[in-house]
Image (cartoon, grey):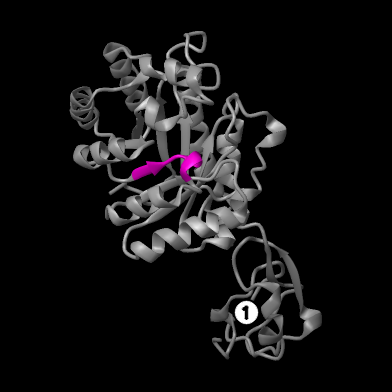
Amino acid sequence: MFRIKDSVYIIAEVGVNHNGDEGLLRELVDVAAAGGADAVKFQLFTPELLCSSVYRKSEIEMLHKYVMPLDLMFRVKEYVASKNLDFIITPFDYESFEDVVKLGSDPIKIASGELTHTPFLEKAAKAGKDLIISTGASYLSDVERAVELVRKHNRINRIALLHCTSTYPAPDNSLNLNAITTLKYAFPDCIIGYSDHSLGITAAAMAVVLGARIIEKHITLDKKLAGPDHMASADKFEFFEMVKSIRTAEIMLGTGMKVPQKCEGNIGRCIVAKRDLGQGEIISYDSIDFKRSGIGIKPYDYDKVVGARLIKPVAENEMITWEHILTGC
């Protein structure tokens, strides 16, 4: 079960950026760990079960080099655990889903393309795992249908919904980050996050400000490597900076409670004596003033002071405290 607590949960998406090389894959896990990620995510698929040979033959051929054998994934899982990272997989077909269950991915990630794949979603819901569901290229009604279906078969485990734009890289004018707010209000019982396919790291920090509790970002060692996702991924330095900017944004956002901050000091005015006031004198409005001292009785309580009798004298410009007046309010 993924460890969402008070801080934003950051997923480093390896995806197919390992290029079929176990050494490169381990290096990407190292980047995720060093950069401060909470989890590393991988993909499992069988190209012929993902794409139609009639319409996507070239895609099938391209994807074969990125297939990850099950024995490799078990080794990767151990390596990820040694780095104290959560291990997450996106399955893209029924056979891969069974492998993901064997591997123990919890949560299981559901890709945007499966949001309307109701038989697949039903199977995922029945697996008894937390689900992270991406919502790229969809209408709100598609998301509603998916959540309703999952909840029909699983009312216990958590659902996270990730807003995203399903193109690589996603242009700035396509990000529609305000949809994060829409998802927050439409699905108050779900965790809302953002899967960032844009260039750079600005969108991730903005998503956090809008309320995203999960950020997912592809990582690469080199944007110039051959492969479909490298260019739209964050390299090592970008990923480190993205995590830093997210943590800074969290600090800046604070608790949301409107209270004075310690660093602000005492800046307000208080009630002071307008002239020397003697013991036993009845305080009148004309005998007080409002000046900065930072402490003392606030001006909004002046009506509790006016009419009270002083039990000890107060010098001009000295603040009047509750200890000075007979009422002792």
Would residue 68 be found to the left or right of residue 170 on screen?
Answer: left
Q: Would you say residue 111 sits in the magenta stretch?
A: yes
Q: Would you say residue 254 sits in the magenta stretch?
A: no
Q: Position of residue 322 (x, y in %)?
A: 56, 80
Q: Position of residue 210 (x, y in %)?
A: 60, 48
* Residue in front for this viewpoint, 77 or 128: 128
Say whether residue 52 is visible: yes
Which quadrant of the rendered structure holds the C terminus?
bottom right
Q: Vertical placement of 79 versus 7: above or below? A: above
Q: Residues within 10 Å of mark 1 (few under 14, many from 20)?
A: some
* Residue in front for this viewpoint, 209 or 67: 67
Element class at badge 1: loop
- Residue 295 placement: quadrant: bottom right
Q: Provide the residue span drawn in magenta.
A: 108-114
Amino acid, disc 1: Pro
* Residue in front for this viewpoint, 271 or 208: 208
The residue where tag 1 is placed is 313
Q: Position of residue 209 (x, y in %)?
A: 58, 46
